[in-house]
Amino acid sequence: MGHAAVIFPGQGSQIVGMGADLVQSSSRALAIYKRADDVLGFDLSALCFEGPAEKLAQTDIQQPAIFVTSVALWEALLEAGGNPGQFERTGGLSLGEYTALYVAGAVGFEDALKLVHRRGQLMQDAALASPSGMVSLIGGDEASATALCDRAREGEVLAPANFNCPGQVVISGSKGACQRAVSVASEFGCRAVALPVAGAFHSPLMESAADGLWPVLEETRFDEPSMPVIGNVDADYHSSPDSIRQSLRRQVTQPVLWQRCIEGMIRDGADRFVEVGPGRVLTGMMRKIDRGMTAINVSTADSIGAALPIPSTE
């Protein structure tokens, strides 16, 4: 089978109806949604299954919804015969890093859910406090994104936020700076698309959210991961509970180095990636990072079988 890694998506992967098929076929997935509703004190599962889309897209709802659906898919995979031991390492894009930490046993479900919910609230508040946004640069790279930010900043905040895959960099900052970036992007060899997000995530404009999250991180119990978990901010593996806390705080305001995370896992032996969570965003990025890699998507009940271990013939 090679050396498999399991990866988890972040914001933007939500879709109304996600998880509805799971709870019909997996008792463990149903239990996850019920626990989430109890922990949060509102009907998150109904928002996942039925929407409305506008509510599900809110940062404070979207983050716990994606986390819970990803965990539900993971639990359904295990119930169907999957084994955590079939994966040698794990990681997740932004919010997905919390799911990876849960899967690796570094944090409990309820603690992770409370963290993710609070993170979403704080990021929503920070977005409302300062008109801001994010812009995807199609065809951009680190050099062009940095040069574009320098050109369009004009005293405001504008910086690279996500290095997702070759040809896709996201920048983040003040509303005016983002608008200027869109208008001059072609001069830097790329096409700019303003993203429908609440604010400038992974930028200095999220500093208040990082400050607010830190006391919660300090109070949360983290353990040594049972398998290597790669971190977004430095594309290196978490080494201790304290490094996890520090990394998750930094992640709120610093760029997500997703391409480097995937390249690092490949360098360390991964040759098969299984994306577990709503949507197919990471599977699509994988094709651009390294077409030679096997990438399997698990986003519905019907897709679970493709990620199960191959029975031994010995």
Image: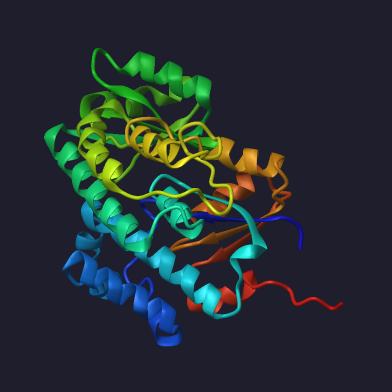
Residue 79 on image: x %, y %: 53, 79
Where is 273 relative to 22, above or below?
above
Residue 113 on image: x %, y %: 30, 58
Left or right of 36? Residue 163 is right
Q: Residue at x 35, y 50 (%)?
A: 221
As rendered, which of 198 and 40 lies closer to the eye?
40
Quarter assignment of residue 194 = top left
As rendered, which of 268 and 287 lies closer to the eye?
268
Left or right of 180? Residue 190 is right
The quarter of the rendered structure image containing the N terminus is bottom right
Residue 73 on image: x %, y %: 46, 70
Q: Is residue 78 visible?
A: yes
How was the colour assigned to the protein in this rendering?
Answer: rainbow
Where is 257 relative to 280, above or below?
above
Q: Residue at x 24, y 51 (%)?
A: 59
Left or right of 57? Residue 248 is right
Quarter assignment of residue 288 = top right
Q: Residue furthest left?
A: 129
Q: Residue at x 24, y 13 (%)?
A: 155
Q: Is residue 21 visible?
A: no
The quarter of the rendered structure image containing the C terminus is bottom right
Residue 58 on image: x %, y %: 22, 54
| Total numbered circles | 0
Q: Residue furthest right?
A: 314
Q: Residue at x 31, y 49 (%)?
A: 220
Where is 148 relative to 86, above or below?
above
Quarter assignment of residue 34 = bottom left
